Amino acid sequence: MRIYKYKLGFPEAYQEIAVHGRPIVLRLAVQGGGPCLWIDGDDSAAPTTLEVYTVETGSVIRDHVPRGARYVGSYDVFGGSYVGHVYVVGEELKTPEPMKAGGV
């Protein structure tokens, strides 16, 4: 398992991200002025695609996001004048195992 960072485009409504197999989204945050996802990926598993949907505040979610997508968080840029709400499809739905003392 390894943690990867993926930069998201904005205000893009839909993106596909090629990820290392069985991804687990750990965090959504703004870094360097743009939104990023930190994902725990399994290098030993086959590559897969994570579908990322971003909707603006006030959007009708069901018009832009498929049923079953998981909400991972919201971010704001441009001093708060744009707020994006991010949903994903294709994520492994499990809680990451705690790290052992001393790292990996």
Image (cartoon, helix red, strand yellow):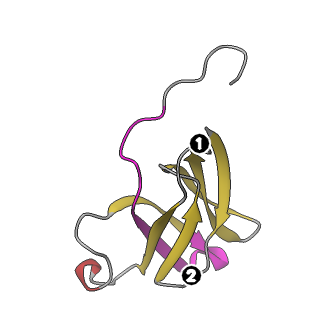
Q: Which residue appears at 57% of the width and 66% of the height?
A: 18
Quadrant of the image containing the C terminus = top right
Residue 73 lies in the magenta-colored region: no
Closer to viewer: mark 1 or mark 2: 1
Question: Could you tell me residue 29's position as x and y percent?
Answer: 60, 58
Q: Which is nearer the N-term, disc 1 or disc 2?
A: 1
Q: Which residue is mark 1?
A: 44
Q: Nearer the viewer, residue 57 or 1?
A: 1
Circle 2 sits in a helix, a strand or a loop, which is it? Answer: loop
Magenta residues span: 76-96
Q: Nearer the viewer, residue 25 or 82?
A: 25
Q: Is residue 14 left or right of residue 32?
A: left
Report, in whole angstroms, how far the alpha carbon at label 1 lies from the one at label 2: 41 Å
Residue 51, compared with residue 82, is above or below; it is above
Question: Could you tell me residue 46's position as x and y percent?
Answer: 53, 53
Question: Could you tell me residue 16's position as x and y percent?
Answer: 51, 74
Circle 1 sits in a helix, a strand or a loop, which is it? Answer: loop
Query: Residue type at mark 2?
Result: Ser
Disc 1 residue crowd, few under 14, some 14–19, many 20+, Cα 10 Å: few
Q: Nearer the viewer, residue 43 or 66?
A: 43
Q: Which residue is mark 2?
A: 81
